[in-house]
Image (cartoon, helix red, strand yellow):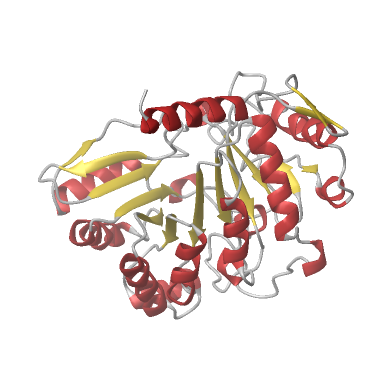
Amino acid sequence: MNRTATVGLANRIFRSLHFLPVQRTGNITSLNTYRPLTDSFGRVHTNLRVSVTDRCNLRCFYCMPAENVQFLPRKELLSFEEITRFVECMVRRCGLTKVRLTGGEPLVRHDLHRLISQLGSIVNLRQIALTTNGVLLGQQAQQLFDAGLRHINISLDTLDREKFKQYTRRDNLDKVLAGIEVARQVGFPSIKLNAVAIQGMTEEDLISLGQFARDTGIEVRFIEYMPLDADQSWEREKVLYAAKMIRILSDGLCQLQPVEKRQKNAPAQSYEFIDGRGKIGFISSVSHPFCTQCNRFRLTAEGKIRNCLFSHEETDIRELLRQETAEDQLIDRVMQSVSAKKEGHEINTASFLQPERPMYSIGG
């Protein structure tokens, strides 16, 4: 066997051993406590969304109040070291493979690139991603890339400046567009745009954003309007459903055809224009919920586990992290939350109740 083949075999053996269950007692390690985060419906949770702050430099009407927002005191936020310790434990002991950093707006958290660098050192954490509104992206893109970030989702609902001011209550469209261009120049291999779709409001934006996808090669993903607004003014009649969006885009630009999902757990169903120019995704949380395939759980900025975006229950782990509690106790607490996960979010049932915490407070 040549040297290249020998090294490859050694690496494969190392990776397989790393995923074996481990338990530490003093300085002794035994292979018997690997604990996948499996709920009562058999869904294995390998995807964590971490909110690093509830603060934001926009005030999108479907997410935050216009004024008098009460943010968490900074001392209540998890430190980068606490977040890293938690993620490392989940990767090593529970098989976590992906982390997405969210907010609020994560780029308002000072030195976020340090956290990305710390997370990047965790063996077998396969992907670190970021969701941002893009306002500060132009200033930080190079630092983020140098720290190891490769996957960015940018929230952008319109390319029209007046509509942007209406939707976000801020005049920052130019900064967002500049941030997208800087990210492209820096060399991020995965850049996607996320746009919330609202009936009677954003139909015209579909066409301009669809054309943007065709012109730039950046995938644009349209998200059905969900009941997570701070004012709790969501109404089903305001949801612009994916089926209608597909018709609008096909009639206004070019016919769309579905693309086979590469990952069954992916929230978006991707389509491509039949002429090969541009890809569009649809996150149809209302019309076609993907709860049966969900592998996600969430860590809020102040250290609470949520097993679903729409959950009404939270499990506090901040004190366990700050006391550097034994890992088994920490994992027990996380398992308590994951095990209690409901079969689905129940938006389409008479029993649905909107969570009290809005999106910016939960973590997008």
Q: Is residue 338 left or right of residue 158?
A: right
Give the quadrant of the N terminus: top left
Q: Nearer the viewer, residue 8 or 55?
A: 8
The picture quadrant where one finds residue 145 is bottom left
Tell me which residue sits at (57%, 60%) in the image.
63
Query: In the image as oriented, which residue stretches furthest toward the left?
Result: 275
Query: In the image as oriented, which residue stretches furthest toward the front?
Result: 2
Q: Position of residue 112 (x, y in %)?
A: 60, 66
Q: Is residue 160 left or right of residue 314?
A: left
Q: Is residue 200 left or right of residue 144?
A: left
The picture quadrant where one finds residue 201 is bottom left
Q: Position of residue 170 (x, y in %)?
A: 49, 78
| Residue 73 visible in the displayed image | no
Q: Nearer the viewer, residue 163 or 192?
A: 192
Tell me which residue sits at (67%, 43%) in the image.
88
Tell me which residue sits at (31%, 40%) in the image.
270
Q: Nearer the viewer, residue 360 or 64?
A: 360
Q: Position of residue 248 (x, y in %)?
A: 22, 49
Q: Position of residue 82 (x, y in %)?
A: 75, 53
> Against 92, is 156 above or below?
below
> Against 345, is 105 above or below?
below
> Against 330, is 183 above or below?
below
